[in-house]
Amino acid sequence: MESDTKKAEKNWKHSLLYLTFIITIIHLTHQTNFSRKLIIGNETVRIKKTSDLPLRFRSDGTFKILQVADMHYGNGMVTRCKDVLASEFEFCSDLNTTRFLKRIIQAESPDFIAFTGDNIYGPSSSDAAESLFQAFGPAMESRLPWAAILGNHDPESSMNREELMSLISLMDYSVSQINPSADCLADSAKGCTPSKIDGFGNYNLRVYGAPGSMLANSSVLNLLFLDSGDRVVYQGIRTYDWIKDSQLHWLRHVSQEPQGQEQDPPQSTDHDTTPITPPALAFFHIPIPEVRHLFYKQIVGQFQEGVACSRVNSPVLPTLVSMGDVKAVFIGHDHINDFCGILDGIWFCYGGGFGYHAYGKAGWPRRARIILAELEKGRNYWTRVQRITTWKRLDDERLSKIDEQILWDQLFSR
Ligand SMILES: *[C@@H]1O[C@H](CO)[C@@H](O)[C@H](O)[C@H]1NC(C)=O
Ligand SMILES: *[C@@H]1O[C@H](CO)[C@@H](O)[C@H](O)[C@H]1NC(C)=O
Ligand SMILES: *[C@@H]1O[C@H](CO)[C@@H](O)[C@H](O)[C@H]1NC(C)=O
């Protein structure tokens, strides 16, 4: 064990060197407008491949998100599956998680992938950087923009939360960020955000309207990512972390920010283009305590295990309710819960366990959640978001589609 830790540390030092190197190169290319490939000595150095930003709806008026919860990636081929049928165990490893990710990307062609934490499983990973590259490999190969936040298991290997989020933000096609930008932090006088925000991986991404439409240069959907933290000891008791006041303060701020260059329509009698606050979707790893109440309510999907939340109930739910724009929250952490239920008008949906090295339930297929936002059609062009729906896909032979439901429809929310 001792030597393993040492080895991991050494590997990590190499990764850090590599990272510093990449950052230097990125700086260099920005300043000198070099070609995308640099030759240093005889080695070709790769530079981060970037996604086109802002994210935007397709010209068919849709934007589809794939939520991947709890991949629990370890060391790849040598990391065995948990909770699969005895007949499946022999030929099952992390590579099955990779295979599922490739299959679902191909089957659903999402526009964006959101990884909601426990992407890697620290105790089974001898080099966090290596595990991250393997875990996110199919996302990078797909060239789709993707974003990740951390769970409680990601930092249990050779990198801490800050190091993990910086590496994740530098990976190909990643649009993940470590925290709100420095501009915003410096602007705390305007109530932008407190000078220090708790955690790593608090950021928002705006999705712009369809190309060529009146809202092509405006945000019509807001994606909010939050770091729900680690395991902690609170008042002498081991529990999970919680979303802190500094994060909630930042959240309230971003929901009030202007949404890009809103254009007044030529004859502004057309209500389709009046600026309204776009709907928002939030993503974090650990469920809030109120999710337990859904056991007694009507839900879509399955509630098969206790909600592993913090003992501390920070005001996440009242904050989201008061913001008004958040229509649904997507969480992970509990792998064999995969339901959606409503709390104070906001849907809370589990992704359902995705990874094969994550605990699960033998015979209950690994799964992923899809979220589809559709725009409203104006007279001749797409306008704002009309409807948000969700469903899940199982990692069975046919990638069965289940539990399709509407999360939000503009018509019923006026
Ligand atoms: C670089 O490549 C060239 C041509 O392939 C070779 O002649 C040279 O020895 C190499 N240099 C080093 C430092 O490897
Ligand atoms: C894991 O992948 C192998 C081949 O890549 C396949 O034969 C096996 O059925 C998969 N197991 C599960 C549980 O999906
Ligand atoms: C959006 O921006 C582009 C590029 O600046 C511009 O050509 C286009 O007219 C703008 N569209 C709208 C609806 O403002």
Image (tube, helix red, strand yellow):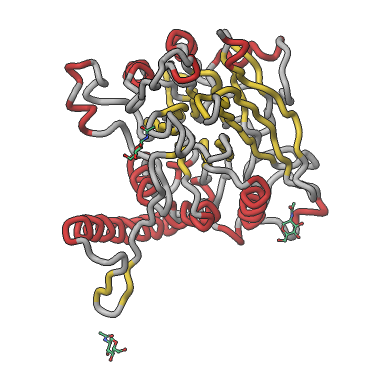
Using the image, determine if residue 13 lies above or below residue 345. below
For the question of whether residue 398 can be seen, the reply is yes
Q: Residue at x 41, y 28 (%)?
A: 219
Q: Viewer-proximal residue, 186 or 112?
A: 112
Residue 243 as seen in the image, left or right of residue 311: left
Q: Pick the residue in front: 413 or 230.
A: 413
The residue closer to the viewer here, 387 or 226, is 387
Figure disc tally:
0
Residue 352 image offset from top left, x and y in percent: 65, 34
Residue plotted at (73% across, 22% down): 300
Q: Residue at x 47, y 11 (%)?
A: 324
- Farthest residue in the right direction? 87
- Which residue occupies 55% across, 8% down? 414
x and y percent of residue 169 in the render? 37, 46
Where residue 2 sits: x, y (%)? 42, 55
88 vs 312, left or right, is right
